[in-house]
Amino acid sequence: MLKVRSFTFFGLGSSDRLAVPERWSGTTRPSRLRGFNYIVYIVICRENFRYKLVLMSEEPPETLKPWPTVGKTPKLSKLGPRFFAFIEALDGPVVFFDLETTGTDTQRDRIVEICLLRVSPLPVGIESPRTWRINPEIRIPSEASDIHGIYNADVDSCPTLADIADDVLAIMQGAILSGFAITRMDLRMLQTEMARVGKRFDPSGFKTIDSQVIYHKREPRNLSAAVQFYCDEELEGAHGAEADTVASLQVFAGQLQKYEDLELGVEGLHEISTSLNAAFVDAGRRFVWKDKEPVFNFGKLRGRSLRSVAGDPGERDYLRWIVQGPFEADTQQLVCEALEGKIRVHKGT
């Protein structure tokens, strides 16, 4: 065991503290202890506005693995008695997690942030969430940055997934995996990303709890549910054209009544109504916006920009096939413009 007979502690605000590499979390600070004939390096993490020792090493922090941000722990007392009963009944840990990514393509996009929150059987309870910001080693499209607020400059000096993969898998090992919409994207994205860095992660080997699936099962989002919610009545004759048409009018009137800040102008209502399609260039969703330019969303060229394909002599026949094939008119118009050297640019914010 390493024994320090006497030491001087350089506090977190001291100019004598070792320089903190940018890849280290802003809440994870390396400091040093000077021993009798040696220096011992320590790392202190801020958790819930208190500082605690999380690592001691004879190696300088620059040689150690990046540590995650340690966030505020949810209070068990505020999560309700049924959640407490859930924890009491656990045979093993549950890990809640979420990913922020460069896009929604689980085969081509990359992870830029991951958070893991481990819940263990009592008396351990809820551990602090651990969050890593990750360099995806590809460009983050502006459309993705607009959603999660993580930009290319923010990840330039962050660790790659390969740097932290073992730590992430260690936290997940033997656990039930839970989160919101994880069965739709996050699990598949994580599987692909781990395989890319030479690690094995098989979602089928885990039990999962997806709170989005539970939400949609228990709170249906159909016309009958909308009539009940906005009009406080049952929809009779559901799935008949007349009944559904009258119900849609009643629901819209109910929405205007309920949401006083909802615009009465057609332009504002149109913008809201088409917001789900804002990520797509054409009605058939064959192309998506990335960095404000069209990118293929289907077929062998999925993930490639229309600009690069139109400029590739070997691929122009494929574009001509789209123009002549069974595609929507606006898709064909978009490709026609590209063949003429005109690449459409997204004018939205």
Image (spheres, helix red, strand yellow):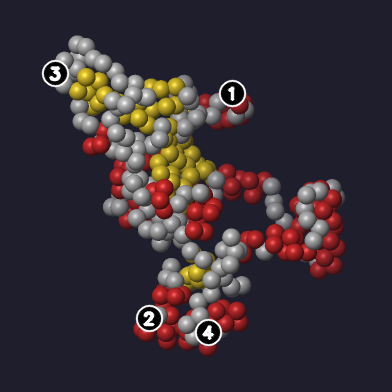
Number of the label disc, if any, that sits on residue 336: 4
Give the residue pinned by disc 2: 312
The amino acid beneath tag 2 is: Asp
Nearest the eye: 332 or 29: 29
Q: Residue furthest top?
A: 5
The mark lying in front, picked from 2 and 3, is 3
Residue 198 percent coordinates (x, y): 28, 52
Q: Determine whether the residue tagged by mark 4 lies in a helix, strand or loop.
A: helix
The mark lying in front, picked from 3 and 4, is 3
| Mark found first going from the N terminus, 1 or 2 | 1
Q: Residue sitting at 54 percent across and 29 percent down?
A: 74
The amino acid beneath tag 4 is: Cys
Residue 232 percent coordinates (x, y): 84, 48
Give the residue pinned by disc 3: 37
Q: Are marks 1 and 2 in contact (CB under 8 Å)?
A: no
Q: Is residue 75 left or right of residue 253?
A: left
- Label 4 to label 1: alpha-carbon separation: 61 Å
